[in-house]
């Protein structure tokens, strides 16, 4: 009887730990669409830099692709991720070539080249792109 009780307890612990792992991975994944709400370095206020449309970034982990809209043009490239390290500079990004007002699109693409890591916070709702220890860009997860 003791062996059976121990077996039941062990099976329950395994099931609970597997379920916990699945939940944690969902909330810390890059997968999906993220909307920019902060970028550093610009002398123009965020709303002035992106008055009509905020940039987005979309991660497709199944195909190792990244893409989105830089507020004016579509872009895409390879997803180069190793743990929390991320590399856009070598991702061979391509963009459409529509004429854009202002320089928000250029500021966005230039900043992506500087990013070397990322952090997901607030239970998967906020994505920060980092250069060293400095947050350079911040996104919110689009549901």
Image: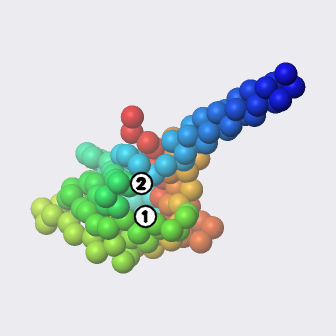
Q: Residue at x 45, y 44 (%)?
A: 140
Rendered location of residue 2, percent (x, y): 87, 25
Marks 1 & 2, CB-CB < 8 Å contact: yes
Residue tagged by mark 1?
Answer: 42
Seen in the picture, residue 83 relative to 47 is either above or below; the reply is: below
Q: Report helix, strand or loop for mark 1.
A: loop
The type of colouring in the image is: rainbow
Quickly name the residue at label 2.
45
Q: Is residue 122 visible?
A: no
Residue 45: x percent and y percent? Answer: 42, 54
Q: CA distance from mark 1 to mark 2?
A: 7 Å
Quarter of the rendering occupied by the N terminus:
top right
**Above-or-below relation of 60 to 13:** below
Q: Residues within 10 Å of mark 1 (few under 14, many from 20)?
A: few
Across and down, in percent, residue 29 comes to 49, 49
Q: Tell me the tag on residue 34.
A: none
Write the residue at 31% across / 58% down: 63
Residue at the extreme right of the image, as rendered: 2
Q: Nearer the viewer, residue 102 or 132?
A: 132
Placement of 81 over or under 24, stated as above or below = below
Task: In the rendered view, tell whether residue 87 sits above or below residue 72.
Answer: below
Question: In which quadrant of the rendered view does residue 101 lie?
Answer: bottom left
> As drawn, which residue projects farthest toward the bottom?
90
User: In this orientation, does residue 75 appear?
Assistant: yes
Query: Is the residue marked by circle 2 packed among few (<14), some (14-19), or many (20+) residues within 10 Å?
Result: few
Which residue shows up at 28% across the image and 75% down it?
Answer: 92
Judged left or right of residue 85, residue 65 is left
Identify the element where label 2 is drawn.
loop
* Horizontal side, residue 65 vs residue 96: left or right: right
Residue at the spot 57% in from the left edge and 37% down from the top edge: 23
């Amino acid at each position: 009887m003791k062996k059976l009780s121990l077996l039941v307890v062990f099976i329950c612990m395994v099931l609970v730990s597997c379920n916990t792992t699945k939940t944690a991975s969902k909330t810390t994944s890059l997968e999906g669409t993220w909307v920019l709400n902060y970028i550093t370095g610009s002398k123009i206020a965020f709303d002035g830099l992106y008055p009509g449309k905020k940039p987005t970034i979309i991660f497709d982990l199944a195909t190792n692709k990244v893409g989105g809209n830089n507020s004016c043009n579509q872009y895409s490239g390879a997803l180069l991720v190793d743990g929390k390290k991320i590399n856009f500079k070598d991702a061979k990004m391509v963009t459409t070539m529509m004429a854009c007002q202002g320089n928000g699109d250029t500021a966005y693409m230039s900043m992506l080249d500087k990013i070397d890591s990322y952090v997901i916070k607030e239970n998967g709702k906020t994505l920060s792109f980092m250069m060293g220890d400095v947050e350079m860009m911040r996104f919110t997860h689009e549901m």
